[in-house]
Amino acid sequence: MQKISNRYKKYSINKDLIIMENNKKNTQFDVAGFGIATLDYICLVDEVANFNNSIFISDVNFFGGGVVPTALVALQRLGGKSAFVTSLGKDWTGKEIIKGLKKEKIDCSGVDFVDNIHSPFSFVQVTRSLGERAIAFYPGSSSLLKFTERAKYLISKSKILHLDGLKPEENLKAAEFARKHGLKVMIDTNKVMEGTKRLLANADYLILPQSFLYDYTGLKDIKDALLRIKKEYDPEILVVTIGIEGSLALVNNGFLYVKTFKEIERKDTTGAGDVYHGAFLFGIIHGWSVKDIMVFSSAASSIKCMSYGGRNGIPNFDATMRFLKEHDIDIKNFRI
Ligand SMILES: Nc1ncnc2c1ncn2[C@@H]1O[C@H](COP(=O)(O)OP(=O)(O)OP(=O)(O)O)[C@@H](O)[C@H]1O
Ligand SMILES: [Mg+2]
């Protein structure tokens, strides 16, 4: 077999402009998000508790989390407009989740409040010295997430639908509806589930974490795995994020690699992937090239990594431009 690295060594980055011309023009929102929202209880401990020991929590903080809502927070801070659909319980946790989203001016009229079940939360123990994490997740009301009439309305008023793939059947209904109404569909998922395959077939923009790519394809080479996904689904945009190693796209049969900003003073990488997606959505809306969007998204997610919590450090557009300039990157292409 011919070596992939030879076959694809030439980057074709001149024809990678994203054309949104077939997309909808008169819309109320840039992006409608559909997925799970959580509240993360981040507990600072000396050592992680197990069934033999009880421990003291020396500090605790509450942070809103979830792949889709955190991406929407990034989009909003950068200057986009979004609406979010999820399912929450009628409890304090649900109120906190909503408070965090409304603060960012995300339209929350699509949130369904259900009786007799708690909102989703994660209980996260973080060790002070090593920064290790032990996470317990309670899905609660997110198991009742439904593609509602209100979801249909909000999606019909948007340009792009962003999904987490965690309730594949309901995600699929949303994706099919969105495409029928002229929207593009982005999926950020990290779990291979029954129904994932059908869902991926309904995506236009696949920006996937490396771990998902390996789990889904069963392959161990990142380029082989991207080629497999392209062959199977041929999405308009196909990118894999590789943590501190940056991101890699497959564009016009060529690989396009973008480094991230490794030299930052890193504090916490929670939510880096979510922010990368939010920034990517912003770039798509403004019609930038895939390469420019990858650079921009790397900058936004790197800045986020310089603060604790999934959302605290998410930058606005001006801060992202300043950061890019400080790193000697020409910002003339990032026109809004
Ligand atoms: N330590 C880091 N330093 C700088 N940039 C980072 C770092 N970690 C992640 N990034 C940026 O964020 C992007 C997404 O990160 P990553 O691939 O870890 O997402 P993920 O696997 O979806 O993780 P999560 O969703 O848990 O944040 C990377 O492609 C990179 O641009
Ligand atoms: Mg992720």
Image (cartoon, grey):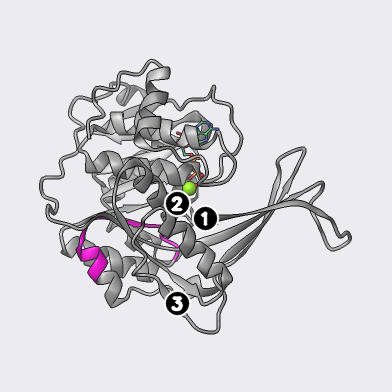
Callout 1 touching callout 3 (CB < 8 Å): no
Q: Nearer the viewer, residue 15 or 224?
A: 15
Single out the residue that lies furthest toward the bottom.
Answer: 116
Give, as a single range, the part of the protein colored magenta: 153-166
Disc with the residue nearer the chain's start (1 vs 2)? 1
Q: Which residue is mark 1?
A: 65
Q: Amino acid at mark 1?
A: Gly
For ligand 1, tell me if the residue under mark 1 lies within 8 Å.
Answer: no
Q: Which mark is residue 70?
A: 2
Residue 94 makes an appearance in the image:
yes
Q: Vertical placement of 251 versus 123: above or below? A: above
On the rendered structure, is 296 left or right of 24? right
**In the rendered image, which quarter contains the C terminus?**
top left
Q: Vertical placement of 21 versus 176: above or below? A: above
What is the spatial separation of the Cα atoms under label 1 and label 3, in whole angstroms?
18 Å
Q: Which residue is mark 3?
A: 113
Label 3 sits on a secondary structure element that is: strand
